[in-house]
Each structure stands twice: as structure tokens, then as C-alpha cells.
Image (cartoon, helix red, strand yellow):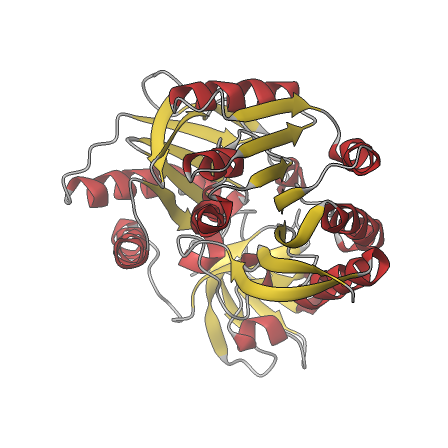
Amino acid sequence: MSAVVTLKKGEGRTLKAGGLWVYDNEIASIAGTFENGDLVEIHDFDGFAMGRGFINLSSKIRIRLMTRKPGQTIDEDFIRMRVQNAWNYRKRTVETDSCRLIFGEADFLPGIVIDKFADVLVVESLALGIDRMKETIIKAVKEVLAADGISIRGVYERSDAKVREQEGLPRQKGFLGAAFDTNVPIEENGVKYIVDVKDGQKTGFFLDQKYNRQAIRRLCKGADVLDCFTHTGSFALNAAQAGAASVLAADASQSGIARAQLNAKLNGLEEQVQFICQDVFELLPELERAGRQFDVVILDPPAFTKSRNSVKNAVKGYREINLRGMKLVRDGGFLATCSCSHFMSYELFTQTIQQAARSAHKRLRQAEFRTQSPDHPILWAAQESYYLKFYIFQVCEER
């Protein structure tokens, strides 16, 4: 019999709305014995059974729900069912050669992410309870893929995010099984990349922008394009391959630029794209002073905020780059701009862009609003699963 966690009266709102988390300040009592990472039963204040989840007293997120069925056995069959459902969903919604196979809470496997890059898996485990089931989940993924004729040649762990420390877990990375070449070739939207799953950011490549990269291609034919925060060159290469007249791509990371140049060469686009290693906040005013103008400006910055405490400073950063970016767009040209922080809400991001437009004396005509690709599904009531906001605007002079 697992321990029973009883919530305070009036608490558990997130859970009752469809979310998967119980916070430390929502708990009235815990009856029974357990160790951190164990499964416990969750009861409302009146004894109503609400499901089972992993508990961890080291984390402010005390419990991560695994099932809403009281007494549900969480075993290999259960895990395989979750994995099969996740794979079936992706087969219906995205191109699966490279995609996010497991997206934590949004796939009802809280705290774990698994990305598939061709025939390689990259695993990021962020919570104690799910970390104990990591091998079981990977085994299930391999079996589910094998049933569709897909063989996985290697698995690499990238559980090196600082957030693990909040769970009382060490940061770790390395091979899970036999070693392999960690420079993995993939193709997305017809563009080839070498993904560094060992030392690249996050799991090595940002799969969530797949269809947003595709969306900017039709704007870029014959255009002068500026790609800011290019990272490994993905937006720039899509623009060049789509027939851009010129592409200038910038990033502050020398290793990122080196990887972007390698990817450009891989696609035979090294002559079409000029990569520069420079801080975008310094570059944009320089380009403005030099009188440079572009038909398309792309702003794909890293998350300027990873907590509620730093949102105010993040707003200043987003306002600044959008204001500068708009000034560099030719009249009637286009701005593609995004935020990848779930703390930067849709409403706040939209308001910030409006403020930037007023300060730049530009008028915006919204062409599209997009979000993360469907292999990063947004689970309603789990706010953390909705993080990417992506706008395409036509930028017009005020007249």
C-alpha cells in the first residue's frame, strides 16, 4: 500500500483543471511511509481519490501525476501504453524522421523528454520519480519503433540541465548503451544538418521550430534576409534554400556559428549565407546606423527569462530587439519574431511587440501567429507545455 497524500481544502486547482502537478503548499498531510521518488496516492481534503504520482520532498513540485485512476498499476505495460499513444499521435501529426517523441507532461510522462534524430535518441530526464523509470521508458520506445521497422542505433543522455538540482538530482550526460558518433546527420524541410547531441544546446537541435522555419520560406524568394540568433543556422539555411537574394546571419556563440557554417557547406549554401559572430543587441543598432535595410528580418532569441522573477528584464530585451528589428525592415517587408519562454505569456509578448511598433513608428499587419510544432503538444491546463509564440508581420511605414 503506497502512502496517501491529502490536499488542503480548496487546493489542487491545477490538478482538478487537468494539470499534473501538486505543489508543496497544497498538501495538508501525508500518511504512510515512502522514499522520495516513490508513487503515492493523492486524495482531496474529503478523501476523494484523485490519482497516483511520484513524490519528491526536495522539490517545490511535490507530486507529478502519472494517472488519474486510483490504484492504477504503473508497470512496463502501463509505460508501453503511454509510449505507444505518444508515437501514434506523432505519426498522425508530424514528419517523424526527426521529432520529439516524448514531451513530458504533455504525453502524460511528467519530467522526461526524448528526441529522435534519425536513428538516435536523446533523453533528458528532469524529475526523480521518472528518472527511476528511464530505462523502462527507453526500452518501450525502442520496442514501439521496432514494431514499425525503425531501428535505433544509439541513445545519449542530456540530463545536464540545472533544474535537476531542484529535484535533488545530479546533472549528468553520456551514452546509455554502446558509444556512437555523436555528430548525427538529419534532414528537415529538405535542409541537411549535423546535430551535435553531445555538446549542442538542450538535446542538440531545436525541433520545435520545424514548421515555423518552413513558413518563412515563401517570404524569402529574392529577398534580402537578416537572421538574428541564428544558432546553428536553421532559419538562415531555409531562407537561402528558398531562393533569398542574400542572407546575413548572426549569433554571439562562436561554436554555434562554426556549426552553422558546417551546415551551410553541407547544403552547398556557403556562398549564399554570410555568418557573423556578434551580439545581436550590438549588431542591430550598427546595421541601423549603416543604413542597412532588409526584406525579411527573423528574431529567434533564446529564452530571456526562465523564471517569473526575471520577466520584467526579459520584456525590455524583447522590446529592444523588436524595435530595432522593425526599423531594419523595408516598407512592406516582413518581421518574423518569437519567444520561447512560457513565462513570457502570449498576452505579454503581444503587448511588448505593440509597444516596440509604436516606438519604431511602424504599423504591423499580422500575417500569421504560430506556436511550437505538433510533436511538442500543448496540454491544456499544463501551462508549462505552451511556451513558443511565433508571429509573422508585414511591417509598414506610418503615413
The residue located at (77%, 48%) in the rendering is 327
Q: Where is residue 8 in the image (x, y as percent from the top left)?
A: 67, 75
Q: Position of residue 242 (x, y in %)?
A: 42, 40
Q: Is residue 129 left or right of residue 295?
A: left
Q: In this view, does 391 lie to the left or right of 319?
A: left
Q: Position of residue 92 (x, y in %)?
A: 26, 59
Q: Is residue 200 left or right of residue 93?
A: right
In this rendering, the answer to whether 2 lies above or below 147 is below
In this rendering, the answer to whether 15 lies above or below 106 is below
The residue located at (84%, 54%) in the rendering is 312
Q: Is residue 30 visible?
A: no
In this rendering, the answer to whether 216 lies above or below 349 is above
Work out which residue is located at the far bottom of the displayed protein and give it. Answer: 46
The residue located at (78%, 37%) in the rendering is 291
Q: Can residue 6 be seen in this view?
A: yes
| Quadrant holding the N terminus | bottom left
Q: Which of 113 and 170 is in front in this view?
A: 113
| Corner quadrant of residue 289 | top right
In this rendering, the answer to whether 363 lies above or below 224 is below
Q: Which of 130 and 205 is in front in this view?
A: 205
Q: Where is residue 183 in the image (x, y as percent from the top left)?
A: 41, 19
Q: Nearer the viewer, residue 57 or 300?
A: 300
